[in-house]
Image (cartoon, helix red, strand yellow):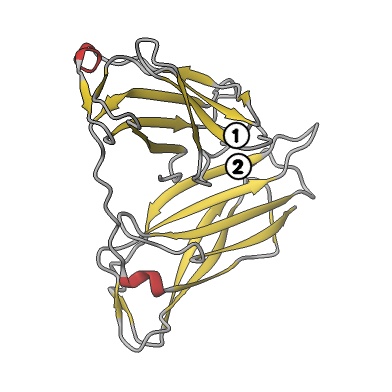
Amino acid sequence: MDAAIGKLIGEVEVQNASNVECTLQGEVPTTMLAGGREIPMLYTHGINEEARVRVVVVPAGGHASLRLDWSGPFCQPTDGTMELAIEVPHGGGTLRAPITAEDRPGCQQGEGINPNARATLYASGFTEPVAVSTPPSSPLNQLTVTVAGPPTAAAGSRLTFRVKLGNPTGSPLALDPCPGYLMERFSLGDATNDAVNTSQLYRLNCRPLTQIPAAGTAVFEMVAEVPASIRAGRELTVTWKLYLPHHMQGGNQLGAFTVKVT
């Protein structure tokens, strides 16, 4: 799953636990539950004619896959165990599948976001099992990240902060291909102030620096906009995360700072 753009893509794998072959065909209405109750969002399961007539044969003990697309903004609080309720086509009953992933679509709100937008869960039709492969490891997952920003910033201004990437290894680390980074802005809302919760994915500018030397560091200057609508006295948190697409990555390559808006 990749939450960087406010949308998650997941696969549900079902198994034929009987001792005879079975078939799956048609649309698969699917809803999401928390604590046994359906989470209010938009649900859709429309598929094209080719997918509607496709018959998936599942041998005894075999598997089939169902793709789900879950898009934000997802702002609903959830209480209790989260699971999926999957209706098997042609009256085959309802399956319950626990949601084991911790990722959630973002709760994008504020300027530029349609206030009427709602989270959506889209279910495709069943297909043959999806081959799962482990993403390769990248040498850049050894980089350390340190972020430093100013203590204050004016509403509507562009603040400058610095990101330091450290190479703790005994060999240079080539920035090839140049990694990405995710920049998030967050400010808690209340009854009179809209929350700020945005994220944007960028590519690091590696043209002037193609590698980080052994036991060395590199400093990149970054810019973030303070929303003009945010009132003086509120706090805005800026989070910077290194992003290594198509590679395994730890969850500690990030940093954040908080400014008081003046």
- Closer to us: 238 or 132: 132
- Closer to us: 95 or 78: 95
**Cα gap from disc 1 to disc 2, whole angstroms:** 6 Å
Residue 240: x %, y % from top left: 52, 59
- Closer to us: 12 or 226: 12
* Residue 204 visible, this angle: yes
Q: Check disc 2 and report its element: helix, strand or loop.
A: strand
Whether the residues at callouts 1 and 2 have beta carbons within 8 Å, the answer is yes
Residue 177: x %, y % from top left: 25, 63
Name the kind of residue labelled 2 in the image: Asn
Measured along the vertical axis of the image, is residue 167 above or below residue 208?
below
Q: Is residue 246 left or right of residue 151?
A: left
- Using the rendered view, name the quadrant where residue 149 is placed: bottom right
Measured along the vertical axis of the image, is residue 143 above or below residue 25?
below
Q: Check disc 1 and report its element: helix, strand or loop.
A: loop
N-terminal of the pair, mark 1 or mark 2, is 1
Measured along the vertical axis of the image, is residue 149 above or below residue 45?
below
For disc 2, the marked residue is 197
For disc 1, the marked residue is 109
Q: Residue at the spot x=42%, y=74% of the render?
A: 143
Name the kind of residue labelled 1 in the image: Gln
- Closer to us: 106 or 65: 65
Q: Residue at the spot x=77%, y=47% of the render?
A: 232
Measured along the vertical axis of the image, is residue 36 above or below residue 232?
above
